[in-house]
Image: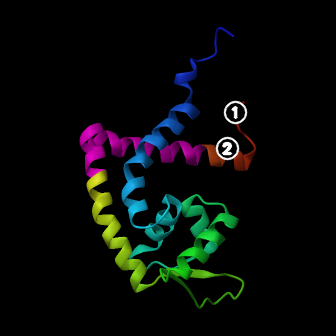
Amino acid sequence: MADAPRYDDSLTIALLRARDAVTAQFRDHVGAAGLTLQQWRVIRALAGGTALDTTTLAKRCVILAPSLTRILRHLGDAGLVETVPSRDRRQRVIRLTPAGETLFIDIWQVSQQKYAAIEDAFGKDELRDLVVSLNRLRASLETDQETGDVPA
């Protein structure tokens, strides 16, 4: 297989390693607040008074539905999220409680410093371009999957 790329040059490996390096920047201060990174993603998605149904929340946070159910149970027991009335009784809509908003603000202050350090290390424009490119890559692959035109 002379045409096979070097293992370290694989897109999937590069993405996994970058994800690990980025999330490592946030793990300690999020953990010190008593949260996992998945729980933090849920809180962050709901910050600022945003109420979301669980399907939208799971997609936005990149969390499988069964895991989200456990996370919401834990965050609800901790008084950080609550269910709100919905026009569609089949949907469960969630929002942060005032305690959840306060926790978000506390963690977000440290997270902003972490993001600034990442921008300093990598470059603000380069980071913005990377996020745009990754979102474009994801969107193009999701479109291909919907049409069945996934490249081999």
Examine the rendered structure and indicate whether residue 93 appears above or below residue 58: below
Q: Tell me how the rendering is colored.
A: rainbow
The N terminus - image quarter: top right
Q: Residue at x 61, y 77 (%)?
A: 73
Say which quarter of the image contains residue 71.
bottom right
Instruction: Name the residue nearer the viewer: 106 or 50.
Output: 106
Answer whether residue 65 is magenta in the image.
no
Prevailing secondary structure of the magenta residues: helix
Q: How busy is the neighbourhood of tag 2: few (under 14 within 10 Å), some, or many (20 plus)?
A: few
Three-letter amino acid code of the residue under disc 2: Asp
Magenta residues, as a range? 115-140
Residue drawn where x is 73% and y is 47% of the image: 147
Q: Pointer 2: what residue?
A: 144
Q: Is residue 12 left or right of residue 46?
A: right
Secondary element at image label 1: loop
- Give the crowd class for mark 1: few <14, some 14-19, many >=20 residues within 10 Å: few
